[in-house]
Every structure is written in structure tokens, then in C-alpha cells.
Amino acid sequence: MKKISLILCCMAVMGLTSCLFDEDENKELTSQDVSQCFNAIKGNHSGSMLFENHNPDDATDNVDTLDIAWTITADTTVVISRFPQAVILDRISDKDLKEALTQAEPAQLKALIGFYQTDPVGFRLYPFPVEYNIEYQNAAHKAKLIFWVNNYSYGQYDASSRAFRMQLMAAGLYLDEDETHSYLINPSYDNTSIPIIITNVNLNK
């Protein structure tokens, strides 16, 4: 596991949150504003994904990283073709389910974009559920990962520094059509939660 300071991780989140949802910035954008925002972030991107993963041998090591690629498509959607299930494994207590997810293939994540700010470009994310095909308890299942929206899933692009960051917060993991029981530990969003951060900025530095 790569060791990354949680402080740096939180700084990335705070940097995004500090400029979100201010009344003056939350005004409706014109179609020209939206086009400007889209043109700034469209295309293919690559960087790092930071997520919760506690090291049993080091209590200070609780964030891991993976390489990730994403695309901003013409219909104003973020697409991650291979969204890694590793981002939620640390929050699953069912050992058999964790093993089943470990063996599964990454799945596609799509999230609609809603721009709210032009400089830096600010946007909210509205992720669709991510579905993993798994073998669990001797049967085939779909494990469905859903995310918090509104103030919890969002992104920012700073044209001056070319820094691109997005945040997602896992809300629940369900099997098949049953959405009455989540298999995630601590599904609530609070100040102890570690979000999933996608960034082209190297936070190791």
C-alpha cells in the first residue's frame, strides 16, 4: 500500500469544499457559461484515485492510491470505464462478500455533470449506481454501489494550474434488487468519513 498523508487528502477536499455552494456562486449559469465550462474539461484525463484503506501494521496509514482514467463526454457526463471495487473493500465486514468483490472485474461508472461556477470551473456530480458481477454464497449476484449526491459529490477544474479534482462518497452497497440492507460499514457522511478523491495532482509531493 502506498502511504499518503491523510492531511493532504483532506486538504484536497477542503480546497474543493471551500468554494462550493456559496450563495453568490450558486447563481444559474447561462448556456454560454455552461459551454465554456464544458470546453475547459472535456476529453480524456488520467491521474490518481485516493480511497480509504487502513494498514493493520500502521495506524497512520489509512489512504491508498490507484491509477485512474476518466473521460468527459459530449453529453456532459463523466465516464470511468473501469471503476475499481478496491475503493470500498475496507468498508465491508462480510469476508465472503469482500472476497467475491476482490475477484470481480471493475465496472463502469457514469456521472452526470451540473455546472454551477465558471472560474474555477465548479460542478456537481450525479453518479449512477456501479454494478459488479460477483459470485457470492455459491450464486451469481449483482453488487450495486451507490453514492451520496448534492453536497457530497462534486468537482473542480482550475485552468491556471490545470488541476482537476473530483470527490465521490460511497453511500451504500446492495445485492441484486434488495436495497434494504447495505453491506458498507459506516454508510453515513460525517467528519470521520474519507471520501474517494480523483485527481491529476500528485498528492505525494
Image (tube, grey):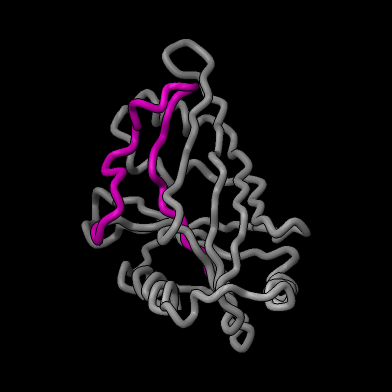
The quadrant of the image that shows the C terminus is bottom left
The quadrant of the image that shows the N terminus is bottom left
Residue at 71% from the left image edge and 70% from the top image edge: 38
**Residue lying farthest to the bottom in this orientation:** 160
Residue at 70% from the left image edge and 61% from the top image edge: 72
In the rendered structure, the answer to whether residue 138 lies left or right of residue 95 reads: right
**Residue 197 at x, y percent in the picture:** 46, 61
**Residue lying farthest to the top in this orientation:** 138
In the rendered structure, the answer to whether residue 113 lies left or right of residue 175 reads: right
**Residue 172 at x, y percent in the picture:** 39, 38
- Identify the image quadrant of residue 40: bottom right
Is residue 176 in the magenta section?
yes
**Residue 20 at x, y percent in the picture:** 44, 74
> What is the magenta segment's predominant secondary structure?
loop
Which span of residues is magenta-colored?
Answer: 165-192
**Residue 95 at x, y percent in the picture:** 33, 27
- Identify the image quadrant of residue 122: bottom right
Residue at 34% from the left image edge and 31% from the top image edge: 183
User: In terms of depth relative to the viewer, which is nearer, 137 or 188?
Assistant: 188
Is residue 83 in the magenta section?
no
